[in-house]
Amino acid sequence: MVPIDPVVPAGRLATPPHPELSLPTGHLLRPWHPDRDAQALLAAGQDPAIQRWNLLGVDSLADARRRIQRMHQRRQTEQAVIWAIARTGADSPAIGLIGWRELDLAGGSAEIVYWLLPEARGGGVAVAAVRRLSQWALDELGLHRLVLCHSTANPASCRVAAKAGYALEGTMRSALLHADGWHDQHLHARITGDA
């Protein structure tokens, strides 16, 4: 059997500095900072919409700081890479989160996850962030297939996926357990070469 080379070589994500990416909305994707962003992560953990769709629970500022440290550790081990979404400016705290989980560098795939705090919703920030991070993952990191999954009961995420160029591929039945029971999920994807 002929071995298949990894799509993205190991070490490619862990070695360079965590990139900062500008958005056309005047926002920036940047690494999370334990002190500056812990309050935003705690607020997200208390927000009903974020809790419902992202299953995020954060109990305290100390818990938020631990989670931020874990984000950095997961990038170093190339399991995930997570950015804070913030307004452009030196000391602007996070207003959202976006990143890649289920990261498979050798196989060239990852799943995008994101959320915004209530004050950041409705202005196109999520679409801009998903587009920019997808461009980075395909063109700069070198992944081949990106997926975006969401509950079929969450039409806002379906709109973000469509506007960001993720084609709907189908419905995964009873795919994720939420607080109110099992949800079907839409599976959207972008691959190298998609418009």
Image (spheres, rainbow, N blue to C red):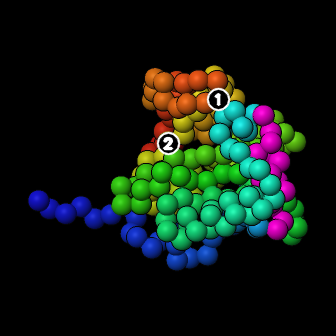
Q: Amino acid at mark 2?
A: Val
Question: Residue 195: percent from the left, percent from the top?
Answer: 51, 42
Q: Is residue 62 left or right of residue 155?
A: right
Residue 75's place in the image compared with 185, above or below, is below
What residue is rendered at 68% in x and 59% in y? 67
Q: Is residue 22 visible?
A: no
Question: Residue 177: percent from the left, percent from the top?
Answer: 55, 31
Circle 1 packing at 10 Å, graded few (<14), some (14-19), many (20+), is: few
Q: Which residue is mark 1?
A: 179
Q: Is residue 188 visible?
A: yes
Residue 48's place in the image compared with 98, above or below, is above
Q: Is residue 116 left or right of residue 179?
A: right
Q: Amino acid at mark 1?
A: Ala
Which stretch appears magenta? 35-48
Question: Residue 41: percent from the left, percent from the top?
Answer: 77, 53
Q: Which residue is mark 2?
A: 147
Q: CA distance from mark 1 to mark 2?
A: 23 Å
What residue is rendered at 78% in x and 34% in y? 48
In the image, which disc is placed on residue 139? none
Question: Residue 7: percent from the left, percent from the top?
Answer: 36, 61
